[in-house]
Amino acid sequence: MRKLQIAIMCFIAVIFSACGSMGDITVNSQRSHLDANLAEIEAKVVPLEASAETLNSNEMRNRQRDITAIRQQITQMERESSGDTDYQGKLIAWSGRLSLLENRYSEAQRFYRQSNSVSPGNLPAVILSIRLEGDPQKRLEIIERELAMLGQRSSGIGELNIERGRALFDLNRFSESAGAFDVAFSAGLDSVYPDSYGSFRSRAWELRNTSGVAAASLNLLGRETITWNDCIALTRNETQLLRFLTAGRTVAEAELFTRLLERGFIPFSQDITVTQWPATRPRGDEAVTRAGAAWFIWHLHAESRADRGMLSRYSARFATGANPRSPILDVPPLSPFFDSILGCVETELMSLQDGRNFRPSQPIRGAELLAILRRIDN
């Protein structure tokens, strides 16, 4: 009888142990499911936040469909929250970050307060609070406090340093900004962060040596696309390359644009396949491509050296005879841009994007243009 009682007790213990293990498995499975949901939302919202800093208002309106779809997904996930307050708080914070993308600041603030009351100090809400602050110096102060509270804990360091890099960039502290992005990318973040903010780090690194640049030029340097008016402003403000036109006098940008166009420093078209210039004049607010920039740069370079022969040096070598050839795959040998592009590439003022193609229709960045202009000015 005694042996039977012991056997029954052991059996009951095994059953309870098994039930406990099954419960743990169920809880862990549910937690993994919720974490996967949050990671999915993060992977969709972060690229939208990064692109919002470079897209214009019309382009952002075109992203509304994406934002609406994510909102619907969050609503569905909230129904599955199963009373997990941390999960609920983070979803609410992500909703607030979507509101901020839509410039609905009051709604974003409401979501922040709601998220923080449900799950105090959750990371998506902390990031939302930082982004709600418009002053970059105040944003930086908030970030530094949050980093100090983290101490040696790794969770959150990457995301907070993304925000730190953004704030430092807005304060024109470019070297520090690049360093903050480097810290963020080395902190084990999901790949969506370096994929979305890698260009920000590159731009900060590119701008790190811009001490002495006029305040009016700094805004132009951060742009991914610039216009002819921007090109003229950078050249006039940061170099001596236009003194042959201005003789040191102040000349309005519109007048400089007209003079440069009439003297052939700005092409009437940026289409490298044209055989005849169009009758219509280009506009000063027209975006400049790499081909247009090469034309502008090479003509200024020839002028600064008082050597007009540079403008036909390469076509005389490559584009004559029965079978003209081009060493650059996407630049035709008979293109009016041939000499300018080859000249910029051979003198290493500009590079081939993949070692073979120039990508003439791509835009040129403000910082890239200034670096080239300074080289030929020196």
Image (cartoon, rainbow, N blue to C red):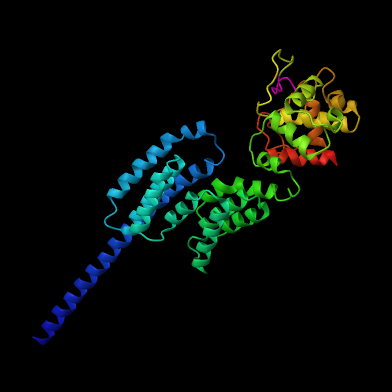
User: Which segment did they paint magenta?
Assistant: 267-273
Q: In the figure, 132 relative to 251: above or below? A: below
Residue at point 84%, 37% (across, down): 240
Main SS, magenta region, reads loop
Q: Is residue 289 magenta?
A: no
Residue 341 in view here: no
Q: Nearer the viewer, residue 65 or 232?
A: 232
Q: Position of residue 192 (x, y in %)?
A: 51, 49
Q: Which residue, as the protein is rendered here, is positioned at the far right?
A: 306
Q: Which residue, as the protein is rendered here, is positioned at the far front?
A: 250
Residue at point 79%, 34% (across, down): 344
Which quarter of the image is occupied by the C terminus? top right
Residue 240 in view here: yes
Q: Is residue 269 magenta?
A: yes
Q: Nearer the viewer, residue 260 or 202?
A: 260
Which quarter of the image is occupied by the N terminus? bottom left
Q: How many labels were placed on the picture?
A: 0
Residue at point 36%, 59% (across, down): 119
Q: Which residue, as the protein is rendered here, is positioned at the far bottom?
A: 2
